[in-house]
Image (cartoon, helix red, strand yellow):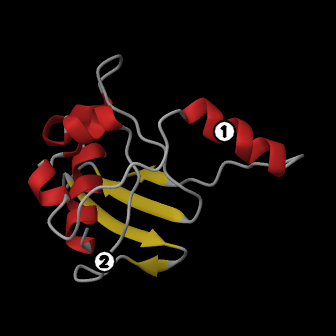
Amino acid sequence: MTGAQLIQIFNYIMREENRLEGQGVYFQVNQGVKAVYNDQEKSLESLTIKGQAVQEHQQYSISLESYNYQNSDQNLGITQEELTKLGDPKVIATNYQDVLEEYFSHHQNINSQIEGRLIYK
C-alpha cells in the first residue's frame, strides 16, 4: 500500500468514534511506529516508522488477520480493492498461536516497555 493509504488507515482507526468503550477496534502497532492524533482537529498529526515520516508515495506492507481484511471498509476505513491496488494479498500464517509460540521459543527473556506508539492529543 502507499503511505497515503497507511495515513488514511491510521486517521480512521484513531478517531474518537472508534474509542467508545466496548465498541472500538484496536490494532497491534509494531515497535518503531508512532502515530499522533489530534482530537480537536479530528485528524492524524503525524505517522512515523523508525523515526522517519511516512511518505505518501512510498510503498509499505502491513499484516492483517483475515477478519479485518474481509471487513476492511468498516474496520480500517479502506476497501479491499484499495488495499490490493499495488499487489495481491499473501497468506503468511493461518494460526496466530503457532506464530507466537515459534517467536517466543527463539526470543527468550524479552524485556518490553511502554513506548507511547499511539498518542492522542
Task: Check disc 1: other Cα within 10 Å, few if <14, some if 14-19, many if 20+.
Answer: few
Q: Where is residue 35 in the image (x, y as percent from the top left)?
A: 41, 60
Please state which amino acid type lies under the numbered disc 2. Answer: Gln
Q: Tell me the SS state at disc 2.
A: loop
- Image location (x, y in percent) of residue 98: 64, 34
Question: Badge 2 local density, few (<14 within 10 Å), some, or many (20+)?
Answer: some
Kind of element beneath mark 1: helix
Residue plotted at (76% across, 48% down):
112
Please state which of residues 30 and 41 is positioned toward the viewer in this rendering. 30
Q: Tell me where residue 93 appears, x and y as whole percent.
A: 49, 43
Residue visible at 27% across and 60% down in the picture: 44
Above-or-below relation of 33 to 98:
below
**Which residue in the structure is indicated by mark 2?**
59
Task: Give the number of the mark in front: 1 or 2.
Answer: 1
Q: Which residue is drawn at 55% across and 74% down?
A: 50
Q: Distance between the residues labelled 1 and 2?
A: 27 Å
The residue where tag 1 is placed is: 100
Q: Earlier in the sequence, mark 1 or mark 2?
A: 2
User: Between residues 3 and 96, which one lies in front from this camera angle?
Assistant: 96
Image quadrant occupied by the N terminus: bottom left
Q: Is residue 89 left or right of residue 95?
A: left
Under mark 1, the amino acid is: Leu
Q: How many marks?
A: 2
**In the rendered image, the vertical position of residue 113 relative to residue 51, given as above or below:** above
Q: Residue furthest top?
A: 22
- Disc 1 vs disc 2: Cβ atoms closer than 8 Å? no
Relative to 116, is 76 on the left or the right?
left
Q: Can residue 114 be seen in this view?
A: yes
